[in-house]
Each structure stands twice: as C-alpha cells, then as structure tokens.
Amino acid sequence: MTPTDLDHVGFAVNDASRTLRDLYQRGVLLPVAGEEDEGFRYVIGGRQIRDRGIRIELLDPNRSRDSFLAHYLQEHGEGAHHITFMVDDLDATLAALHRADIAVTRVDLSYPPWREAFIHPRSGLGTVVQIASSVHTYPFGCDHHHTGNATDMPHRQTGHNRHWWRQALGYTTAPAVAKTVTAVELGVAGPAVARTVFSSVLGGRETISTRTGVTSYVWPSGTIEVAPATPPQVNMLYIGGSENDVEGPGFALGHTKFVAGDPR
C-alpha cells in the first residue's frame, strides 16, 4: 500500500446481511473481511483491480437500539456514513492535522492491527473522515472462501465473530462481472478545509476540471470530487474506469447514489 490512500466508503444500513446480498449480486461489494463489535458489525469488500478501486463497507447496529449507529440511522437514514484513508504513519498524519488546526476525535492508537482517529463532519467536510493504520492489509480480490486467520487482516481489538458475513451471504449467486468504484462525489461546506485535509495533509493530487470547475483529489485507488452542497454529505459514487466494468443502470443506497461512468 502507498503511504496514504483512499481506502473505503462506509455505509450505515439497517440490515447489513440483506444489503450485502444485494451489493454482492451487483458486483459492487465482494467481501473479504468483517466482524462484530459493541453496538455494530461490519463487512468490507476487496479490490478487484490490484491497488485500484474504493472498497465498500457496510455497518449496521447489530440489533442494538442504543448504539451510535442506531442513533445515526434514526436521524439520517441509510447512506454513506464515512470515508476512510489508510496511512503508513498515523502519528505523523495526526501531527500534520494538528498543525493545520483540524480537530480530531476518538483517537485510539493502542492496537497496531487497527489504529484510528476521526475528523468530525462539523469540520466542514460534510461527512466523517476516518484516518487509520494497520500492520496488516486486506487480501486482493474476492476471497470470501478464504480459510486463513481473520486476524491476519486489519481487525479491531474488541471484535469477534469475524466470519458472520459468510453465513449472511450463504449461497447467493455470484455476479457475472465485478465492478470497481472509482470516485466519490462529496458535497462540502468548506472547500478550503477540503483542500487542507485532502491535499496538504493526505497528499491527494488536486485537479480542477476546465469544463465544470469542479475540484478533485486523486489517490492511487480512487478520487474524491468536491463541490459545495447543502446539506454537505457524500452524494454519489461512480462505478467504472475498467475494461472489466459494465455500464448499467444506477441505483441508490439510502441517500447515496451509485452511477455508472467516471466523474465529471
């Protein structure tokens, strides 16, 4: 993995089992890892093109009625919940955010297989941004039949039942073609904050479209396209950019759309 990369978009959903089966059949989420933790569970997909593509993660409250995720769903409904960057040196990244006067919260540096911190959406970015590091990496491709040790992948210290999603997937028919999520359209309240975080701190290559004036930040695995929006949030994910992808009708997951093609 490169020193800093756009890793995945996490979606808050009411039932991760049901949504997993839907996205799996669409070829958008081919799972490689997951686990249960206090108040939530998750499953995350793999990259079908090595070092290219934004992973999709699903999180649900796992029957909890009083967890942070349950409250989020009650207030906002289903849709994109956070964007995650993986970095080699989380301590250095946090220091850079501090120098840039970007506040972080829920910092946990205690467990090398999953160290994390969060930038709150009130920073002006419009969505939660998770900054994480791990001594492990996710396997390449769709490896839901993988029989190795789940703790050889990024995992939480308090996680358990790390294969719950296999039972949820069951005998669901595999998609004919795996699709690659290449870009995220992010509506923000503070474009200057986006430039500081995504370019200055996280090293995204800034480009501005001569046709639309939209600013994008590019990492090896994907792109964030930034535009002012009310309310600020992740609005859209783009599927495309590979000879193995197929054009097709878009669909929505809660308030977030998936569309075929590349960003503007």
Image (tube, grey):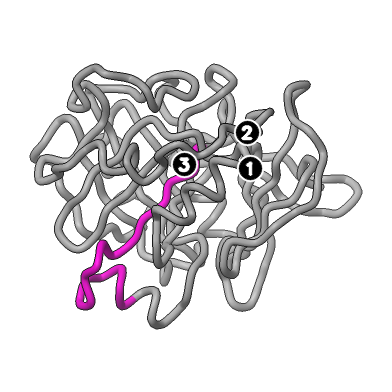
Q: Are marks 2 and 1 in contact (CB under 8 Å)?
A: yes
Res 238 → quadrant: top right
Task: Please name whichever residue, 189 or 137, is drawn nearer the observer in this view of the structure.
Answer: 137
Mark 1 highlights which residue? 26
Secondary structure, mark 3, is strand
* Magenta highlight range: 55-71
Q: Is residue 262 left or right of residue 45?
A: right
Q: Nearer the viewer, mark 2 or mark 3?
A: 2
Q: Residue at x 41, y 22 (%)?
A: 143
Amino acid at circle 3: His
Q: Which comes before the other along the chain, label 2 or label 1?
A: 1
Amino acid at circle 1: Arg
**Label 2, label 1: how far apart the Cα atoms are:** 6 Å
Is residue 45 shown to the viewer in this render?
yes
Q: Which comes before the other along the chain, label 1 or label 3?
A: 3
Q: Residue at x 59, y 20 (%)?
A: 49
Mark 3 highlights which residue? 8
Secondary structure, mark 1, is helix
Magenta segment includes 57:
yes
Res 240 → quadrant: top right
Mark 2 highlights which residue? 175
Is residue 95 shown to the viewer in this render?
no
**Label 2, label 3: how far apart the Cα atoms are:** 21 Å
Q: Mark on residue 179?
A: none
